[in-house]
Image: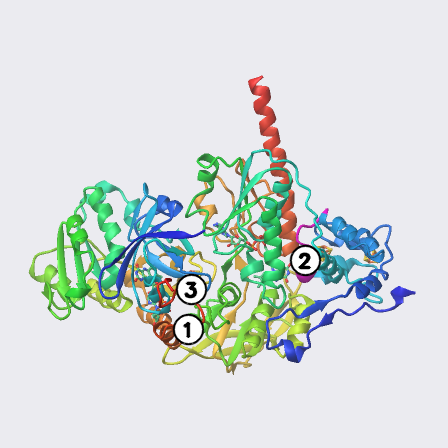
């Protein structure tokens, strides 16, 4: 039986080659590969995989179409639940989501749902399959703040429902983390991210870049002066954390956001772009999440020896399994159970090393993970000239501090319910701005649900007005 | 979104003024804030203080010194040309505009501008004038040729003092010496100083005002990338705490700033920048078509 076979491996660039280029690592499936992999799926009656997907894509449904080689049909099934399949097929932490729940997860290996989704999305794009169904324009205006996955999904959904949507983006390019954070070798910018943004524009969505809500214009002004009937805030969680250890302001210490922004958004690694980047001979990336892996693999590609310094053990690394595996293959050195205590600085203010201590795991803490404790007398110096801090991010208080009546919690996250409703009438929010740093698919899902709620809110308001005047 | 350069004036050898069309930015601008401009697709994001704004015309004025490759390229653009990106206003407005005007009336305030620092000082002085408040101003520069916005400042300030390092104009000496002279020999008395100029000048001025016991504000200009709090490139130590100059500042209590660290951080890209400048000066032909030819060829 087909499902006894393991999953069909996706073609990849070889580690030795890819570690010095920025081309996509995963080359993906051919049509033949995809159909063979699709045929492993049992089409379960009560599919657990669907329960594992934050937006509930009808996974057996699209795989069924794939088995029949009906790619357009498969794309349509996915489009009912997801507006960014080419992105999510590439970056979702599938092993914890859809694939983690697949009945084969523990036996022959889960169905490669992510790779199949990527295949369907890439194939539809390359063959110009049109998935847009748009209702006639209704003349009503909605503003969306931020052009990351949450904002794009919300804007796209509202445009399909007939609204005139304007996205306001603080940066000079749209895409949020997809553009400035996740590197080219995992998520190609021109082919994938720009194509997704172009699709949203084709629906009639306008994107005004270089507009910072809270500075250039406030939420209240959008509602009162520019007559938007509702606003969706998808401003992400972009404020980087630092450790607060000595030497952290030395030259050569960066946040992962700064490092990745210089490379991805400002294209500092290309000769003809003006923004500079400092390349270290030896780089330590502090942290163990997706962001840390991206920073480490980027530094490696720029020619540095690269260490991941993480205070817990391998098993607790929060990054996606595939990214950790790829990083190892490419030659990133993993210093786990290691914690920095001080950055050493030379007389010019440059980093000359990092003092670290070894850790061991003790009793489980509140998060259920075993608490790392310092091993006495284990201090040593890691010889590095660059340190990249990848310790997580918080939402930026720029919007909440300039908008009256918008509640936040103690982490500066905007308080919103599952439909995106905030404490302020007409104002909705979703994605990392509400949850703190999370995932592309959950941000996209939040944008879509908020779009439905905004649609309902505006229609209801219009109805009330009509009855009022009658 | 492209923004048109509607006016360009060369103020000195290497200082330029430009009025740039950016209606949304002009409408929201306040004294003390800054903008970020990016010349073209491949350009750097350059932070520059808002030197003036006109809400009716929808323009924002910037005054910049050509120090590196990106500012040199910006200076090559002419009236009628466009910059690709122009975003703002960024940072916190100057603390004064939040203060009670009546209380400000009782305060003796002095602004001290070093070199191109006159540009960011001017809108603040103008704001005081518009609110019928008197302030004194010192402009300091290396020599007479480098003094900018003198007439504008004279019109807005109660007293304008000028110093040049070489004595070619005004007081013969540094701004720090001039301030000391005003306070110690000319009976002047100040409750607050606002100092804006090169980092090194702000450092020494801050030491001087500490000696003279004058509370002091400086406007820091560290290296920035996004200007919205997203990267931390602009971090400075103020009172031993890490602050992001682009969102917490750019203005800070001068007596709490770690200037030595701030100066070291500013030099982070020095050698790389040297190479980039060479490229501009030698007329790099494989990119930036407008580079070196004013876009006319
Ligand atoms: C390096 C990195 C790697 C990651 N890897 C993965 C991965 O492999 N898989 C995964 O699922 N997730 C990953 N994530 C997380 C994922 O990217 C985020 O959860 C997701 O992008 C959140 O989407 P969002 O739309 O809420 O916010 P964002 O993508 O952060 O977008 C917010 C947008 O709003 C703009 N904005 C902010 N403030 C304002 C304002 N005041 N005015 C106007 N615009 C504003 C920002 O400039 C930005 O463009 C990664 C994140 C990073 C940083
Ligand atoms: C909030 C803020 C407001 C500013 N306002 C003005 C202004 O009104 N007028 C003006 O002329 N300049 C201003 N600056 C400085 C201006 O941004 C820099 O001069 C400019 O970015 C240099 O760009 P460049 O590519 O030409 O040179 P760079 O490539 O940046 O480098 C040139 C040299 O200048 C140093 N340098 C780099 N960045 C800065 C910086 N931000 N400030 C000072 N030196 C730097 C570097 O060490 C290098 O040696 C401001 C900076 C900030 C952060
Ligand atoms: S969107 Fe993500 S979680 Fe959902 S099916 Fe696709 S890859 Fe799996
Ligand atoms: S759980 Fe696995 S086998 Fe079952 S439908 Fe989902 S993908 Fe197919
Ligand atoms: S410039 Fe990036 S945080 Fe200030």
Indicate which disc, 1 or 2, sits on the residue closer to the N terminus.
Answer: 2
Answer left or right for A407 relative to A443.
left
- Nearer the observer, A412 or A228: A228
Q: Are marks 3 and 2 in contact (CB under 8 Å)?
A: no
Q: Which mark is residue A250?
A: 1
Residue occupying image coordinates x 55% and y 18%:
A469
Magenta stretch encompasses residue B279: no
Q: Which mark is residue A86?
A: 2
Residue occupying image coordinates x 87% and y 69%:
A5
Judged from this view, the residue extending furthest toward the front is B297
Q: CA distance from mark 3 to mark 1?
A: 22 Å
Q: Which mark is residue A138?
A: none
- Nearer the observer, A288 or B145: B145
Q: Are marks 1 and 2 on the same chain?
A: yes
Q: Chain of mark 3?
A: B
Magenta stretch encompasses residue A83: yes
Tell whether circle 3 marks a residue whose Cβ is less than 8 angstroms from ligand 2. Answer: yes
Q: Are marks 3 and 1 on the same chain?
A: no
Magenta span: A80-92
Q: Are marks 3 and 1 in contact (CB under 8 Å)?
A: no
């Amino acid at each position: 039986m087909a499902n006894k076979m393991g999953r069909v491996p996706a073609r990849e660039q070889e580690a030795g080659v890819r570690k010095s280029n920025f081309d996509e690592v995963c080359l993906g499936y051919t049509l033949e590969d995809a159909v063979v992999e699709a045929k492993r799926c049992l089409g379960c009656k009560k599919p657990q995989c669907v329960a594992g997907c934050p937006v509930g894509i009808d996974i057996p449904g699209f795989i069924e179409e794939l088995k029949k080689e009906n790619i357009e049909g498969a794309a349509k099934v996915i489009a009912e639940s997801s507006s960014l399949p080419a992105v999510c097929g590439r970056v979702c932490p599938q092993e914890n989501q859809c694939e983690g729940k697949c009945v084969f997860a523990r036996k022959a290996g889960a169905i490669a749902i992510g790779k199949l989704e990527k295949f369907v999305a890439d194939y539809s794009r390359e063959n110009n399959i049109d998935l847009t169904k748009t209702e006639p324009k209704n003349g009503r205006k909605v503003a969306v703040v931020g052009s990351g996955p949450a904002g794009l999904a919300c804007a796209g959904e509202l445009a399909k429902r007939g609204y005139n949507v304007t996205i306001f983006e603080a940066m000079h390019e749209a895409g949020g983390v997809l553009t400035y954070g996740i590197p080219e070798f995992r998520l190609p910018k021109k082919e994938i991210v720009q194509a997704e943004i172009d699709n949203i524009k084709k629906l009639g969505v306008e994107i005004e870049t270089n507009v910072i809500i809270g500075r250039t214009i406030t939420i209240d002004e959008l509602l009162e002066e520019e007559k938007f009937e509702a606003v969706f805030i998808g401003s992400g969680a972009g404020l980087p954390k630092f450790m607060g250890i000595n030497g952290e302001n030395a030259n050569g210490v960066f946040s992962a956001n700064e490092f990745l922004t210089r490379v991805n958004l400002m294209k500092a690694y290309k000769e003809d772009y003006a923004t500079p980047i400092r390349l270290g001979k030896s780089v330590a990336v502090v942290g163990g999440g997706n962001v840390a892996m991206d920073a480490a693999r980027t530094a490696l590609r720029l020619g540095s020896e690269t260490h991941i310094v993480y205070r817990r053990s391998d098993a607790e690394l929060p990054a996606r399994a595939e990214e950790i595996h790829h990083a190892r293959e490419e030659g990133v050195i993993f210093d786990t159970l290691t914690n920095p205590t001080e950055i050493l600085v030379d007389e010019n203010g440059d980093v000359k090393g990092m003092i670290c201590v070894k850790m061991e795991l003790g009793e489980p803490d509140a998060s259920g993970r075993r608490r790392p404790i310092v091993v006495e007398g284990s201090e040593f110096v890691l010889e590095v000239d660059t340190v990249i801090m990848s310790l997580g991010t918080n939402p930026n208080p720029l919007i909440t501090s300039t908008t009256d009546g918008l509640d936040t919690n103690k982490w500066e996250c905007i308080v919103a319910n599952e439909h995106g409703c905030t404490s302020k009438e007409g104002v909705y929010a979703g994605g990392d701005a509400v949850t703190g740093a999370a995932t592309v698919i959950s941000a996209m899902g939040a944008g879509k649900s908020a779009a439905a709620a905004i649609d309902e809110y505006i229609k209801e308001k219009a109805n009330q007005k009509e009855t009022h005047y009658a | 979104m492209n923004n048109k350069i509607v006016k360009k004036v060369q103020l000195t050898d290497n200082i330029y003024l430009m009025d740039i069309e950016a209606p949304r930015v002009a409408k929201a601008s306040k004294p003390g804030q800054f903008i970020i401009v990016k010349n073209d697709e491949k350009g750097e994001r350059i932070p520059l203080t808002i030197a003036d704004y006109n809400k009716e015309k929808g323009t924002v004025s910037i005054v910049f010194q050509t120090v590196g490759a990106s500012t040199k390229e910006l200076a090559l653009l002419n009236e009628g040309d466009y910059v690709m990106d122009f975003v703002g206003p960024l940072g916190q407005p100057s603390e004064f505009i939040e203060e009670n005007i009546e209380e400000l009336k009782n305060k003796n305030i002095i602004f001290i501008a070093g070199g191109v620092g006159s540009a960011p000082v001017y809108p603040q002085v103008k704001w005081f004038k518009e609110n019928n408040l008197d302030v004194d101003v010192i402009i300091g520069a290396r020599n007479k040729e480098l003094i900018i916005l003198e007439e504008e400042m004279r019109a807005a300030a109660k007293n304008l003092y000028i110093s040049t390092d070489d004595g070619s104009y005004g007081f013969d000496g540094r701004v720090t010496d001039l301030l000391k002279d005003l306070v110690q020999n000319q009976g002047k008395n100040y409750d607050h100083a606002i100092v804006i100029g090169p980092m090194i000048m702000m450092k020494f001025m801050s030491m001087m005002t500490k000696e003279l016991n004058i509370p002091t504000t400086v406007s820091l200009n560290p290296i920035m990338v996004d200007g919205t709090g997203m990267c931390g490139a602009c971090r400075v130590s103020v009172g031993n705490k890490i602050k992001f100059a682009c969102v917490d500042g750019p203005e800070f209590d001068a007596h709490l700033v770690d200037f030595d660290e701030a100066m070291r951080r500013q030099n982070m890209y020095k050698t790389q920048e040297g190479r980039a400048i060479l490229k501009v000066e030698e007329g790099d032909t494989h990119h930036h078509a407008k580079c070196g030819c004013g876009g006319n060829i």
